[in-house]
Amino acid sequence: MDWAQSWKTTLFLMLADVPVHLRPLVASISLDGTSATTLIVDSNTGEPLARPYLYNESCPDALPEVKSIAPVNHTVCSVTSTLCKLVSWWNNDKSDKKSTILLHQADWLLWLLHGQLGVSDYNNALKVGYDPELDSYPPWLLSQPYSQLLPLIKAPGTSIGHLKGDVRAQFGFSEDCIVCTGTTDSIAAFLAARATKPGKAVTSLGSTLAIKLLSTTRIEDARYGVYSHRLDDKWLVGGASNTGGAVLKEIFTDEQLEKLSAHIDPMQASPLDYYPLKSVGERFPVADPNMEPRLHPRPESDVEYLHGILESIARIEAKAYILLKDLGATQVDEVFTAGGGAKNDQWTKIRERVLGLPVSRAAQTEAAYGAALLALKGDQQK
């Protein structure tokens, strides 16, 4: 699978989907990408020099080296961190490294639109070691030989430049249309929900389960896969589990999920205790690369089986919020839901019971809406 080419193709198909009569009215573009999905590209041509490292890929070979340079329990001290991927590539790739640069998925796709290679944002750069509190790369990182690959960092939703002329001409966008720095998928989902007060949280139930809690306190602890993203003068505390919708879709079709869910009594606790994962390894609320999926025993009833899986994912979510409180984050008092799982009303009621909190579907559940808000922010700063 050529991931980079598939992303590029998808991006341009989406531009082509914008109605022709609206294209001249588009003032600003931004996008979100999966956190820690990493590309090493040629700094002259922008072409990937190796296959992309996906968000959930582990690079255990690099972890001892990363731990030897980073502060204890830093966000980068995880086998799936961007920095571990960079170090692994640096140590194993024998090619000339002089004309190379690291980009995240969102950075590379935005580069296709603005043409200024080597720009990222402080949300995507967190897992490569960027310090959003100091607004700079730390000295322990800059002293490493591979620091030459690190991109220039701007705040999310900052104008980088105008849309490239060839893209503008191809699709009929305005000459004034700008391209802005992006963010990660879970932060975009949080922005879409417009949860603006400390204590408000967004759980994204997409292919994985990601939670973000708006806190006045910054929390970092790689032992539990917990990290904080900067959001203006507050902190988005949380992490991403490998459980979520991808596991459900391996077992049930969308039609089955809808029909079976309708027969679940969400007020009744399921006695089944699972840890639903697609493959070995968990990131949050337990950072354990060796954790095995647990989806047995399977009862005869598919309704009971689905109930058990949905409830087990809700328990993982509850454990995550309890952990954040124990580590010193602002206590959660309300949860908004984004992603495909937000559509499942029975699951929402199960989660409300398990969490013991008000849970509702966010008014806007698509991360793309959050990316559009960043584009609006960039346009307003012009």
Image: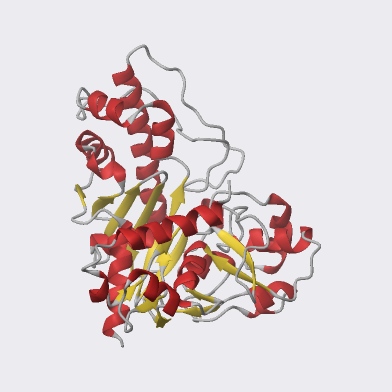
Residue at point 60% right, 70% down? Answer: 46
Please state the total of marks drawn on the protein image: 0
* Place of residue 89 in the rendered image (x, y in percent of width and height, measured from the top left): 71, 60
In the rendered image, the vertical position of residue 58 relative to residue 268, given as above or below: below
**Which quadrant is home to the N terminus?**
top right
Is residue 238 visible in this depiction of the protein? Answer: no
- Residue 283 drawn at (x, y percent): 52, 48
Query: Left or right: 303 with respect to 133?
Result: left
In the picture, measured across the screen, residue 98 lies left or right of residue 107, that is: right
- Judge by depth and name the residue closer to the eye, 253 or 224: 253
Q: Position of residue 212 (x, y in %)?
A: 36, 58
Extreme residue in the top direction: 300
Across and down, in percent, residue 250 comes to 44, 30
Report if residue 212 is visible in the image.
yes
- Quadrant (top left, top right, bottom left, bottom right) of the C terminus: bottom left
Residue 357, above or below 180? above
Query: Measuring 19% from the left and 26% from the top, which residue is drawn there?
Result: 262
168 and 327: which is toward the camera:
168
